[in-house]
Amino acid sequence: MPNNLIFMTGATGVLGQDLVKELLKTTDSHIAILARAKNRASHSDRVKKILKAIDLDSHLGKRLHVIEGDVTQHKFGIKKADLEYLERECKVFYHIAALTALNGTEKECQQINVGGTEHALELAWDLRKKGKLERFVYFSTAFVAGSIWNHCSKEDELPVKPGFANYYESSKYKAETKVREAMAKGMPVTIIRPSIVVGHSETGVVSEFNVIYPFIKLFAHGVLSKLPTHLENTFNIVPIDFVIRATCAIVKDPRSVNKAFHVVSPKPPSIGMLLETGQQTYKTIPPIEVIDPKKFVKSQMNGQEQMVFAMLEPYLGYLNGHLTFDTTNTRDILRGTGISMPKTDRAFLKTLIGYAVKVGYLAI
């Protein structure tokens, strides 16, 4: 049996898949993955299919183990034998599972993001008291500070009155509050706060086109032609390979206990840079009219644009907020590791768009 077991929720998601791959490559740890049955597929069949797609299925039953459970249930509804296994072996617990859709309802976000974190902490206390748990690693978001106000978010605190753009942000704020309460009571915690996670820094590769990608697609395909923002406004995106490598380095360092880390871009791109890069590289992208948000009137759009724009409103905070991030903890702990803060410049944007075009996500 392993003596350095990692337990992970959200391992089948975008971040989780890459984190599992990195941990298998850089450690000798065994990894237990939480999964639930879905769409008539058993929990184990789902994981096997996902792992096969990323060439990791050969590790199943060897260094990768699947545990049936659901984050919406107390202690994830894990069976007694699996709980005893975790109590005997688990040293590090990564809680990544979350509803990341920016248009998620309040009920959905509360149930999965807040309730799921409460259940994770309930299990973590059990593993801490009965077992050998040394670290609870919580994946939060840089936007717990709220994206729609002018604020510099500090790593080791939460603002008192944040400005939220959607229920995703507010639910992650509540969830991190729960984690910090557990930390104050003695749970050894490391909080990872990524911004908007996008493709690989060198290849643009990403397993799912989420968050910012559908937004880009609507404009690239001419579905929307008006954008209420300012060209100089920035949006903080971060390449997935940096998030994964930085997380592994942070968790490995004992100084990261009871601290939070902004895993973000120190110099995020501007809206103007994104539009120029796309239109200069792909001449077929239709012109986009940038309108001062104070002068923007949704009713002046045609019916289809109004309907689509209503779906985009939860995203607008990322284009019109002035939230910035302190990265003192992250820079300090990465110093000497060979991991540099990411560059999200024109070349990077071109790489991201190029990959989306290459695989057919963007038809331009």
Image (cartoon, rainbow, N blue to C red):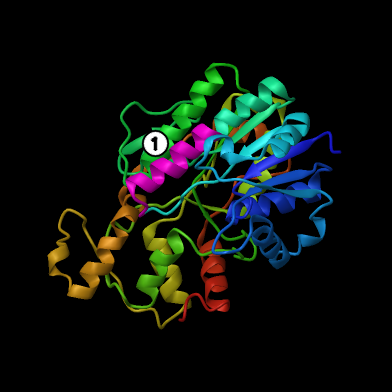
Q: Residue furthest front?
A: 80
Q: Magenta segment: does it hold 249?
A: no
Residue at far top of view: 185
Is residue 323 visible to the viewer in this orientation of the structure?
no
Point out the stretch of residues depicted in magenta.
103-119
Q: Amino acid at mark 1?
A: Ala
Q: Residue at x 48, y 42 (%)?
A: 141
Q: Quadrant of the C terminus?
A: bottom left
Q: Nearer the viewer, residue 318 or 62?
A: 62
Q: Secondary structure at mark 1?
A: helix
Displayed quadrant of residue 252: top right
Vertical order, 293 against 286 (above or below): above
241 sits to left or right of 101:
right
Q: Is residue 250 left or right of residue 272?
A: right
Image coordinates of residue 39 in percent, x first then y, are 54, 64
Q: Look at the magenta stretch and give its main secondary structure.
A: helix
